[in-house]
Image: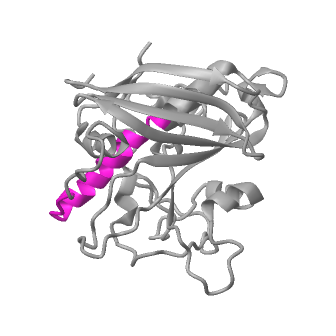
């Protein structure tokens, strides 16, 4: 069944319980005071007073293969410039306060909370113990406005999966695998919507699609998804299970646009990877922009 979605990446966290100053990635441009508003998430890349409040980035930075994704400048000679600017952000669902336990220890989720599945049910040390999103910031054209945010065609996520997700001993349930793919693939639309809002705030007009670009290709999809303002649903999600998704373990999840159809259908593909760069599961899906809010 198609799952209703909203702009589930709105808001920003102000909680500060841990010093994340050790997490430093080389920026390719001067930080903006509005960087935290990209994706509507808690951007710890430039640490604008909103650091790694739950220690999730710190956890992944402590895992060598995860750190290699988050800090591609590792291993370069001291003083050399990084060729990539990686933005690490925290999904809104990870910042929501969890419900207060009932007297019997159970939890009653709020009926007004978006994405309760990831904000509450799958937000435990036994399920998804840590979850961050990151993406490469496109190089800024020297002729572009300094506050311009280009569309993002691909993003990645790191998750720490716990035994509470198991279907078999030490193996995540197949339904959870599909749910994870659906969640991460679905973050591309709100990411680009938030970046477009940033541009609008500064009166920045995005350059037109290059004449050589496919008018229905990934670039066009990323640009058009910024206009999805009434939410969207999953039209279909085709999942292929390649290898068991082992737990407990961290995994990498990737998502990228492939094409669009008309003004309302956005096609995305993605995969779950392990520490050996092996594909564990993959999916392709279509997200359909709603004409009216649910």
Report x, y in % for residue 255: 51, 40
Report x, y in % for residue 154: 46, 47
- Dominant SS in magenta: helix
Q: Residue at x 63, y 54 (%)?
A: 56
Looking at the picture, tell me which residue is in the foreground, 5 or 69. 69
Q: Is residue 54 above or below residue 107?
A: below
Quadrant housing the N terminus: top left
Q: What is the residue that sits farthest to the bottom in this orientation? A: 79
Specify whether residue 143 is in view.
Answer: yes
Indicate the quadrant where residue 188 lies.
top left
Report x, y in % for residue 254: 56, 42
Q: Is residue 157 above or below residue 293?
A: below
Q: Residue at x 38, y 47 (%)?
A: 191
Looking at the picture, tell me which residue is in the foreground, 93 or 257. 257
In the drawing, does residue 25 fall left or right of residue 66?
left
Q: Which residues are magenta?
A: 185-206
In the drawing, does residue 15 fall left or right of residue 124?
left
Looking at the picture, tell me which residue is in the foreground, 280 or 192. 280
Q: Residue at x 74, y 56 (%)?
A: 65
Quadrant housing the C terminus: top left
Indicate the quadrant where residue 18 lies.
bottom right
Looking at the rendered structure, the number of numbered marks drawn on it comes to 0
Q: What is the residue that sits farthest to the top in this orientation? A: 1
In the drawing, does residue 172 fall left or right of residue 27?
right
Is residue 172 covered in magenta? no
Looking at the picture, tell me which residue is in the foreground, 144 or 40. 144
Q: What is the residue that sits farthest to the front in this orientation? A: 212
Specify whether residue 111 is in view.
Answer: no
């Amino acid at each position: 069944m198609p799952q209703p979605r909203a702009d589930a990446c709105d808001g920003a966290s102000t909680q500060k319980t841990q010093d994340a100053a050790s997490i430093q990635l080389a920026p390719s441009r001067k930080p903006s005071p509005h960087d935290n508003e990209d994706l509507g998430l808690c951007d710890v890349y430039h640490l604008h007073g909103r650091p790694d409040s739950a220690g999730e980035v710190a956890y992944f930075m402590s895992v060598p293969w995860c750190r290699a994704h988050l800090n591609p400048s590792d291993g370069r000679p001291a003083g050399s410039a990084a060729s990539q600017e990686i933005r690490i952000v925290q999904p809104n669902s990870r910042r929501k306060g969890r419900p207060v336990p009932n007297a019997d220890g159970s939890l009653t989720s709020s009926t007004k909370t978006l994405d309760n599945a990831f904000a509450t049910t799958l937000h435990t040390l036994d399920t998804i113990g840590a979850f961050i999103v990151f993406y490469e910031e496109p190089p800024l054209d020297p002729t572009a406005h300094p506050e311009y945010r280009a569309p993002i065609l691909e993003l990645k996520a790191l998750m720490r999966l716990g035994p509470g997700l198991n279907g078999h001993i030490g193996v995540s349930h197949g339904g959870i695998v599909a749910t994870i793919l659906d969640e991460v693939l679905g973050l591309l639309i709100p990411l680009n919507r938030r970046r477009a809002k940033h541009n609008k705030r500064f009166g920045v007009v995005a350059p037109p699609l290059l004449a050589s670009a496919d008018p229905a290709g990934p670039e066009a999809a990323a640009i058009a998804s910024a206009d999805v303002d009434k939410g969207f649903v999953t039209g279909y999600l085709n999942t292929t299970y390649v290898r068991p998704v082992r737990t407990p373990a961290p995994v990498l999840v990737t998502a990228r646009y492939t094409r669009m159809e008309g003004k309302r259908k956005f096609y995305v593909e993605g995969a779950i990877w392990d520490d050996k760069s092996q594909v564990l599961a993959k999916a392709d899906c279509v997200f359909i922009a709603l004409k009216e809010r649910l």
